[in-house]
Image: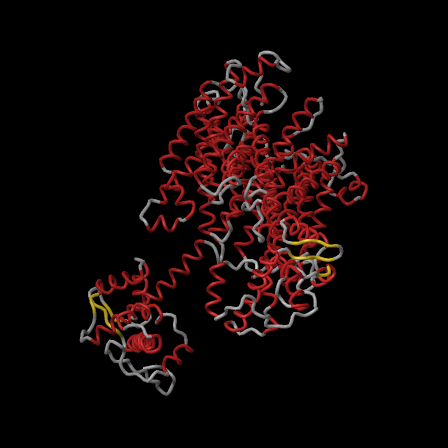
Amino acid sequence: MHVVLAQMGEASWPEIFDIFTFRGGWNSSVALLGTTLLGIAAGLVGTFSLLRKRALMGDALSHATLPGVCVAFIIMVALGGEGRSVPVLLFGAACSGVLGVLTVQAITRWSRIQEDAAIGIVLSVFFGVGVVLLSRIQSMEVGTQGGLSRFIMGQTAGMSRRDAFIMGGAAIVALFFTIVFFKEFRVICFDRPFAQSQGWPVQTLDLVLMGLVVLVTVVGIQAVGMLLIVALLIIPPAAARFWSERLSVVTILSALIGGISGYLGVITSSIWSDMPAGAVIVLASGSIFVFSFVFAPQRGVISGVVNHLRLRTRIACDHVLRLMLEVIEEQRGIDQPEAAVVEASRIVHARSWSPLMLALALGWLRFRGMLDKRGPSLVLTTQGATAAARVTRNHRIWERFLVTHADLAVSHVDRSADMVEHVLSAEMVAQLEQDLALDDPLPPSVHEIGESPAPDDDR
Amino acid sequence: MIALEDILQIDLPAALSAIFVCVTCGLLGNLLVLRRQSLMGDAVAHVVLPGIVVAFLLSGSRSPWIMVLGATISSLVAVFLIECIKRFGRLDAGASMGVVFSILFALGVLLLERAALDNVDLDADCVLYGQLEDILWLEPTTIGSLLTPQVWSQAPREMVTLGVLMILSMGFITLFFKELAITMFDAALAITQGINAGMLRTVSMILIAVAAVASFEAVGSILVIAMFICPAATARMLTDRLRTQFILSGLIGAWTGLAGYALAAFGPMVANRMGLISWDHSLSASGLIAVLGGVQVALAIVLGPRHGVISRRIRTLGLAVQIAREDLLALLYRAEEAGADGLRRRWALETVRVGVGSRMAPRLAMRNALSRGLLNGDTEMISLTTEGRSKARTLVRTHRLWETYLVRELGLRPDHVHRSAEELEHITDTRMHSELDKQPATTDPHGKPIPEVFETPDGAAL
C-alpha cells in the first residue's frame, strides 16, 4: 500500500514539489494520475447513487466481487495460466458484482425482506463464498496468490501503466456518460414515475447507471481496496451535497473532491512511505466531509446553529416589544409610546424567559436602536415603537381572525397568535384587514391581557 | 480414520464456539432486522478495527478484554456519530453509515500500519476472517471425560466467553420479551406504558456490539454480519409471530453453525473418499457457515410455506381459477339469456382468458367445473347444468345488483360500472349480499333483468 520513492524515508522539498507536479518519477506519476482520475469518476457516479439512497449498495457490490475474483483465478489456473492476469480477475469481479446487485433486487422483489437486510445478506454471503474459495486457493500448489490480497486491501504501488490507463479509461467513460445522460439520470433520481410516463427507457438507464457503478468499483478496488472503495463513492458526493442545492454543482464538486482526495492520498503516501495510500485517500475525503458538515454556508452545522439562534432572538425581540407596548397601553394608552417609561421588572416577569434569551433580546434591541435603558427602566425609541406597533397589530389581527373565522374561544387564541405574529407578511395583513374590516391603527385585544406568564417557549 | 480425541480436542470446541456465535447473533439479529437496521451490523464490523488498534496503542496490552472494550467503545461512538450526521447533516441512513464507518475503518488501517511499524504484530486478517480452527481444548480425551469438571475448567477462553454471551442474550430476550416487542413496533406506545424505550434500545445496542466484537474473533467481522441477518431473515419468511420468530432464528442459527462447521471440516474429506474431488483439506468454516446461512434464506424465500414464492404463486393461481370458473358460468348464463343453448368451448375459454389474464387458469377452471357437475360438455360445446345455472344466476344477480348500486348510490354513469361490477361480483360475501338485496330494483342500469334467486325448502338456491 505504499508508493515508494527511489530512496526510502523522507523526501526533500524539491523532490516533493516534483511529485506534486507529476514529475516525481514514472511510478508515482502514473499512480497519481490514475488515482486522481479514479477519484473524479467515483465522485461523478457516486452522486447519483447517493441521491437515490443506494449508497450502501456499493458496499454490497464491492464485497460481492470477491467470489468472482477467486473463481476467475481458479479457472485460469485450471487452464494452465498463472492466475495473475489482472483483466481476467477484474472481469470475474465485475460479473459477480453484478450478480450481487441483481440478487439484492431479486430478494427485495420476491420476498418481504427489506432492502437493508438484502444488502447485508448479499454482502456477507457472497463474501463468505469468496472466503471459502480463498481457503481452497490457499491450499492449491500455485505460485503467488499475492494478487488476491491487493483486491482486499488495495495497493497503489506497483500500479503499472496499464492499470493507470484502465483507470483513466474508466474515468473518461464515466465522464462521458454522465455528461451525455445528465438530464436522464437527473430525472430518474428525482421522479422516476414521471420519466416512465414520458416514455423514457428507465430500465435501460438504471442498467447504465449500475454499469457505471460496477465499472468504477471494480477498477477502484485495485487502488483503494475492496473495503474502502465504497468510501470514494459515498464521501465526496455527501460532502458536495452540503454546498449546493443544484445537482450540476453537486456533481462537479463531488468529482472535484474525489479527484483531490485521490491526489492528496497518493502524494502523502509517496512522501511518507509508511502511510497506506488507500486509507489516506479516504481520510482526505473524510476531512473535506467534516469541513463541509461543519462550515458549509446553508446546510452546515455552524450555519444552522447561527440561523436558529438568529430566529430565536428575533422572536424574543418581537415579544419584548409587544410586551412593552401592552404595558404602555395599559398604563397610559398608546399615544406617544416613546414617552413612556417601563420598569424592566415588568418585562422580566411577564414571560418565563431564560435569562440568556432575555439578555440577548434586550441587547439586540438596544443595539438596533429600538430600546433605551434608563436605570432600571426601559424606553421605546421611535423606531422601536413602530416595530412594536407592527407586531402587536399582527398579533391582534390574527386573534380576531381566529375568533371570527375559526370559531375559537377568546381565551384560546393568544398562544397561536404568539407564534404567528412573527411571520405574517404585509400582504397577508392587508388581506386580513380587508376581511375583518379593520382600520384601527391598533385594534384592542380580544382578551384581557392577564398577568399569568405567557407560554415559555422563549427559553 | 480420525481419532475421537482429535475430534474432542479440535472440532468440539470450534463447533461449540460456532454454535454459540450463531445462536447469539441469530437471536440478537432480530432486533436489527425487524427495525430495519441490519446494516448497523455492517457498520460495527468495520469500526471494530480502529477500536482494537486504538485500545492496543493506548494500553500497550494485547489482552482480549482490552480489545473487546476498545471495539465496543468504538461501536458506540460510531452509532453516535451516525445519528449526528443523520440528524444535523440530513443525510439518509445508509449514506451516514457509509461515511462514518469508512472513515473510521480507514483510520484503523492507518493506525494499524503505524503499529505494524513498531514491530508489533496485530493481525488484521484474523479480524476479517476469524480463527475458528485455532480454538483448541486440550483436556478431554474421551466422551466420558466431558462429564468431569476438571476438564471443563480447562475449556478454551473463547468458547466459554461465547457460551456466556449466548446465555446472556437468551436471558435478555426472554426477560424483556414483552418490552422489546412493544418497543420494536411502537416506541411511543411503549413510553406511554412506562417502558423506558430509549434505555432498552441502548442496552440492546451495547449487547449487540459486545456480541459482535466477541464473535469477530471466532468467525471474522464480515461473516458476523451474515449471522446477524440470515437466521432472522429466514425465520421472517417462515412465520408471522414474534415469539416463533425468535425461537426459529435461534434454532436456525444453531443448526447453521453446526452444519457449516461439519461441512467445512469433514466435507472435503468425505468427498475425496467418495472420489468426487482430488483434495481433502478442510475449507474455511466461517465462510461455509455464512454460505449455508445464505442458502437457507434463499430456500425460505422460494419454499416458505406461506410467504414463499412458490406458495404465493399457487395461491394466486387458485384464486385465478376460482374467478375464471365464475366468469365461465356467468358467460354461459348470459349466452342463454340471449337465446343460445350453449357455447363453443374454445371461444368461451378465450373470452375468459382475456378477462383473467392467465392461460392456465381458464383451462383448469373448465375442467374443475365439468368435474363438479356445473357444466355439461364435449369437445365442441359446453352448456350449463341445473346446478351450474343456479350458481350462474346468483353471480349475474350479484353483478347486476352492484351495477344498480353503483349508479344509484354512487352516481356513476351506467357505462362506467360494468368493469367494477365484474371485479366486485367475485368478492361479495353474505353480508354485502344482504345489503345489495335491499335494493328495490328489477332491472339493472342497462335494462337487463336482475335474476331472482329462490330458496327451496331445504335451503338450496334454485
Place residue B362 in its image quadrant.
Answer: bottom left
B115 up-or-down from B79: above or below: above
| Residue B382 position within the rendered picture, expressed as x and y whole percent measured from the top left | 23, 69
A444 up-or-down from A83: above or below: below
Question: Which residue lies at the image location 64% right of the left edge and 30% below the top edge?
Answer: B124
Q: Which of the two residues, B244 or A36, is positioned nearer the viewer here?
A: A36
Q: Quadrant for the N terminus of chain B, please.
A: top right
Place residue A390 in its image quadrant.
Answer: bottom right
A39 up-or-down from B251: above or below: above
Q: How is the image coloured?
A: secondary structure
| Residue A176 position within the rendered picture, expressed as x and y whole percent measured from the top left | 38, 31
Q: Which of the two residues, A35 or A216, is positioned nearer the viewer here?
A: A35
B257 up-or-down from A352: above or below: above
| Residue A168 position within the rendered picture, expressed as x and y whole percent measured from the top left | 43, 25
Q: Which of the two residues, A395 or A38, is positioned nearer the viewer here?
A: A395
Q: For residue B387, say whether it is visible.
A: no
Q: Outermost residue, left direction? A: B339
Place residue B187 in its image quadrant.
Answer: bottom right
Q: Which of the two residues, B261 or B171, is positioned nearer the viewer here?
A: B171
Left or right placement of residue B461 versus residue A245 in this view: left
Left or right placement of residue B396 versus residue B189 in this view: left
Q: How many marks?
A: 0
| Residue A164 position within the rendered picture, expressed as x and y whole percent measured from the top left | 46, 22
Left or right placement of residue B2 versus residue A137 in this view: right
Question: Which residue lies at the image location 54% right of the left edge and 51% below the top edge?
Answer: B234
Q: Quadrant for the C terminus of chain B, please.
A: bottom left
Q: For residue B386, say whether it is visible.
A: yes
Left or right placement of residue B335 versus residue A297 in this view: left
Q: Outermost residue, right direction? A: B150
Question: Which residue lies at the image location 46% right of the left edge and 64% below the top edge?
Answer: A431
